[in-house]
Image (cartoon, helix red, strand yellow):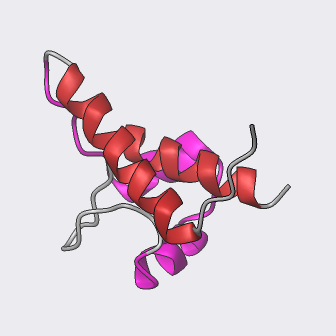
Amino acid sequence: MEVDLSEKSLQRLAELIGEKIITSRNAPEPWIDINALAEGIGLSKKTIYKYTSTTDIPHKSGRPLKFKRSEVDVWLAIKRRGHR
């Protein structure tokens, strides 16, 4: 069975999955900075900044920017699946 979801639906699904991952762990997931994220996912800091400026990538605004790796992993999976 194939289901065609809109980008908005996929984003909401990613948020819900990310929330479920976070709440299912005993210890809260730590925030990581842009350097750790860039190294961990293989994107340049410039690309990540571009995604944050369009509010595309899940992040906590402020100085410095902060990210939850599990949320970004879900977001990446959805982005990559959409570009096949």
In this view of the protein, which residue sits in the foreground, 61 or 55?
Answer: 55
- Residue at image position (73%, 59%) is 82
Judge from the rendering whether residue 59 lies leftward or rightward of residue 75; answer left or right: left
Outermost residue to the front:
1
Is residue 32 covered in magenta?
Answer: yes
Q: Residue 73, relative to residue 8: is it above or below?
A: above
Quadrant (top left, top right, bottom left, bottom right) of the N terminus: top right
Answer with left or right where residue 83 lies relative to residue 57.
right
Across and down, in percent, residue 31 comes to 24, 45
Q: Residue at x 62, y 63 (%)?
A: 44
Give yes or no for residue 20 being in the magenta stretch. Answer: no
Query: Which residue corresponds to the image point at 43% horizontal and 84% vertical from the top-left?
Result: 53
**Residue 14, placed above or below residue 5:** above
Q: Most extreme residue toward the left, as rendered?
A: 27
Outermost residue, bottom direction? Answer: 53
The quarter of the picture where the C terminus appears is: bottom right
Which sits in the foreground, 57 or 7? Answer: 7
Horizontal side of 32 relative to 61 (left or right) equals: right
Q: Give how far across and how far down residue 35 sits, in percent.
A: 44, 53
Foreground residue, 76 or 37? 76
List x then y, in percent, for residue 19. Answer: 26, 41
Q: Outermost residue toward the top?
A: 26
In the rendered structure, which segment of residues is drawn in magenta?
Answer: 27-55
Q: Nearer the viewer, residue 40 or 16?
A: 16
Q: Quadrant of residue 65?
A: bottom left
Q: Quadrant of residue 17?
A: top left
Q: Is residue 8 rendered to the left or right of residue 18?
A: right
The x and y percentages for residue 70 are 40, 38
